[in-house]
Amino acid sequence: MVVGANGIRPNLHQIQGIMKNEQMTKIKFATVWLAGCSGCHMSFLDMDEWLIELANYVDVVYSPVGCDLKEYPEDVDVCLVEGGVANQDNLELIHEVRAKTKTLISFGDCAVTANVPGMRNMLGGSEPVLKRGYLELADDTRQLPHEPGIVPELLDQVLPVHEIVPVDIFMPGCPPSADRIKATIEPLLKGEKPKMEGRDMIKFG
Ligand code: SF4
């Protein structure tokens, strides 16, 4: 039962006001998966029971592991971005995420440095990567993928997120541990900036 500060049970209108206030205080939270292996998102899920507490403070408005919405919404407060920027879809999405997000967090080594997906950069462009993967190493039906509008075009280089758009917080790790993710998010819920320093918070790998 909802009871007001004076101990008197509020009427329906007041309850609606309380519920509205509660909704208004929740922050709009998103996670995005670009060119990564999803390991950073798996580590996010490793926060286990703290996710239930987190749900008291956030509305998950976009996430491959927490929400089924396909369009990135307006006015997102905090977004974790996993992965490097490797193809045209990644490129369009990260620009949209930046334009609609207050605090953008580069989430994991692939977002921070390009890391594993960036290893293809040493081949010198998208053409040799596609030829190696789809022609030279194919057992049969050798052909280059080319379906404009369906298969996103590869960029010549995989880039870390901050080389495309400004990033507010860098959270390295491959993946970042659940403890590090929690320690990064928790201050943001109170309107504070996390201290990204020391081995526990910024060690790569
Ligand atoms: Fe996977 Fe590591 Fe990249 Fe995260 S940083 S997406 S765990 S390879």
Image (tube, rainbow, N blue to C red):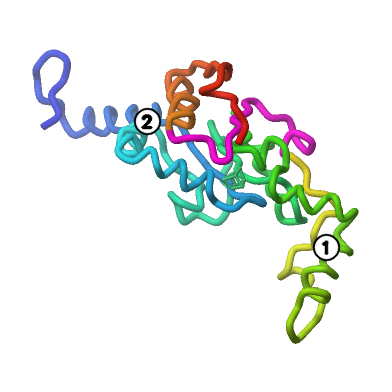
> On the picture, is 109 further left or further right than 52?
right
> On the picture, is 163 further left or further right than 180?
right
> On the picture, is 133 further left or further right than 28?
right
Residue projecting furthest to the bottom: 141
Location of the N terminus (image quadrant): top left
Above or below: residue 159 compared with residue 132? above
Ligand 1 is within 8 Å of the C-beta of the residue at disc 2: no
The label on residue 57 is 2
Rendered-image quarter of ligand 1: top right
Per the image, the residue denoted by label 1 is 129
> On the picture, is 108 further left or further right than 152?
left
Q: Amino acid at mark 2?
A: Tyr
Q: Which residues are magenta?
A: 161-178
- Residue 41: x and y in percent read 50, 46
Say whether residue 173 is magenta: yes
Q: In the figure, residue 151 lies in which quadrant?
A: bottom right
Q: Amino acid at mark 1?
A: Val
Residue 156 shows in the view: yes
- Residue 73: x and y in percent read 56, 45
N-terminal label among 2 and 1? 2
What's the CA distance linking mark 2 and mark 1? 43 Å
